[in-house]
Amino acid sequence: MHKYAALHPILMHNPCTYAILKNVTTEARNVTDKRTAILEATIRVLRERGLSGLKVEEVARRAEVGKGTVYLYFEHKQDLLKALVEHRTMHFYDDAEAITQLDLPFAERLQKLLERRLAFVDEWRGLWSAVAREADPEDKRAWLTGMHQRYQNILENFVRAGVESGELRRDLNVPLTAATIASLGCSPQLDFPRQDFIANLVEVFMKGVSA
């Protein structure tokens, strides 16, 4: 059955209604695609040129849209930066949640999670604070806390599942253990081999929490 058929049987027998619905769906997808293209172009420009070198003209060129299209989606540069932080952060959270739900032992999932977390940190190295400050949301603390709460919830579910599976101690404080995992995802200031560093983090952490 076609995906639109389930909405109403008349649709499949009314070419005009069907065409309108199909066009609306296509337009909505195009809007999402353009918005995402602009945000991904923004992070590329930031990596190469820094915040001071971020120009809307260059973002538009990289996203292959007109300058006016950027302003259609983002009224000010602050709006663009705020949306960028939310977009990339939520993308990381989606990945994190998927990793924690893999059919693997807890320690292996933790290692994959930390690898993804450090990749996210690398992506924003030297940019996060400046971009968040320049985005200038009305209540920056509530904005940042609200985003991080989702990561905290993901990690609490991860820890809780580990306790229920018998891999982690039953006496663990779930929220504090989740917060500890969140704090593990910071790059060391010294240049240690990445995989060795992550493996050691996992080993030390698991020694403290394993059942």
Image (tube, helix red, strand yellow):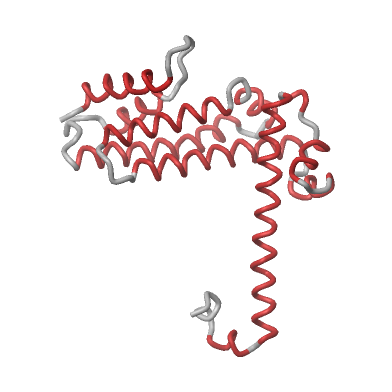
Residue 195 falls left or right of residue 83:
left
**Count of numbered tags:** 0
Position above or below: 164 against 8: above
User: What is the quadrant of residue 166 in the picture?
Assistant: top left
Position above or below: 56 against 23: above
Q: Quadrant of the C terminus?
A: top left
Residue 54, horizontal then vertical, whole percent: 76, 29
Residue displayed at 51% across by 37% down: 147
User: What is the quadrant of residue 87 in the picture?
Assistant: top right
Residue 210, horizontal then vertical, whole percent: 19, 28
Residue 6, horizontal then vertical, whole percent: 49, 79
Residue displayed at 58% across by 22% down: 125
Q: Nearer the viewer, residue 80 or 60?
A: 60
Position above or below: 98 against 51: below
Residue displayed at 48% across by 80% down: 1
User: What is the quadrant of residue 98 in the picture?
Assistant: top left
Residue displayed at 70% across by 26% down: 48
Residue 161 falls left or right of residue 41:
left
Q: Nearer the viewer, residue 44 or 137?
A: 44
Residue located farthest toward the top when viewing the structure as drawn: 190
